[in-house]
Amino acid sequence: MKYFIGSLFTLPLLPLLYLQGRRVKQTIPDLPEAVEPAGISGLKSDRCIKVLVVGESTMAGVGVETHREGFAGTLAHELSIRLNLNVNWKVQAKSGITVSRVSKELLAELDENNWDLVVIGIGGNDAFKLNNPVRWKAQTRSLIQDLNGKFGNVPIVFTNMPPIKEFPAFTPLMKWTIGNLVEILGESLKQVVAEFENVYYSSEVISIETWSKKYNLSNDIGFYFSDGVHPSKLTYQTLARQSAEFIEKNEILKLDSENSTNQ
């Protein structure tokens, strides 16, 4: 219903939305993806888990130089501290990718299948391309099934949807249209995740105001984005910290001698 009502308001504004989107795209610098997409964090325990990070530009680290200072490296560091273990992590991500392309373009390139945790960051590009919630639900359901088929019953965690309403580079119309859509896609993802065992979604809508209070950070929006759209180092690390808290709180990693490997 939210999507239908929003579509009625948005349809006449599509030409303007298109022009604004092109203008914003032209003003945003073409930042590269982060380098060094694999590593080990911890090194102080005889237990080690393997974590795979999959997704779009946020998971690809656009906006920071290396993955170790971005989402994946920080998540691994946080998990190693919270759970007292080593984390062998790898990033399989691509800027601009949508959920329908993940299996063929990212998962198909992976030879390893013995992961202890898969973390997925997706949704921003689907919102930019105005994907509808019915198709999105079918595509995310298919992705989960592909992951289960390839990796077995590994825990799967979807990170929070990107905070498009906070993007400094976006116009009010873009924030309202695409920002509302990405939240609708998040609600749809929550419904799909409920259909599966061992699949989780950190559904809290990201708010810079909330983050600044919770983690005692600056409330200056400029600190949170590298180019007005992609996260800054601060945002990557805060999102990773929040994700680690979510994983720990929900006891997603069942750590015992059978499912944590010595490496």
Image: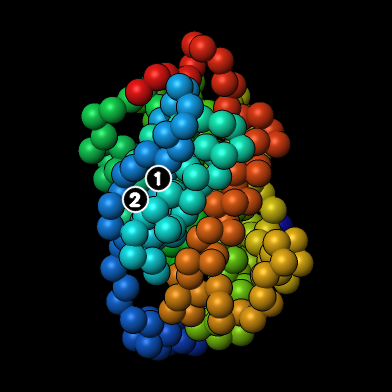
Residue at (45, 22) in percent of width and height: 46
Asked whether, in this view, residue 196 is left or right of residue 18, the answer is right
Q: Give the residue type at disc 2.
A: Ala
Color theme of the render: rainbow
Find out whether the residues at labels 2 and 1 contact each other: C-beta distance under 8 Å. Answer: yes
**Residue bearing the label numbered 2:** 93
Asked if 192 appears above or below 182 in the picture, the reply is: above
Q: x and y percent of residue 30 in the render?
A: 30, 76
Amino acid type shown at disc 1 = Val
Secondary structure beneath label 2: strand
| Residue at 35% in and 23% down | 263
Which residue lies most toward the front here? 44
Q: Identify the residue shown where x is 48% and y is 27%.
A: 45
Q: Is residue 258 above or below residue 34?
A: above
| Circle on res. 54 | 1
Q: Is residue 4 visible?
A: no
Residue 26, image x and y in percent?
34, 86
Please tell me how crowded label 2 is: few (under 14), some (14-19), or many (20+) other residues with Cα within 10 Å: many
- Among the 4 quarters of the image, the one containing residue 181: bottom right
Q: Please, is residue 262 above or below residue 178 in the view? A: above
Name the foreground residue: 25 vs 91: 91
Residue 156 seen anywhere in this rendered image of the structure: yes
Q: Residue at x 72, y 66 (%)?
A: 216
The earlier-in-sequence mark between 2 and 1 is 1
Separation of marks 2 and 1 at Cα, in angstroms: 5 Å
Measuring from the top left, give residue 153's x and y in whole percent: 48, 21
Residue 96 horizontal/vertical position (percent): 35, 61
Question: Mark 1: which secondary structure?
Answer: strand
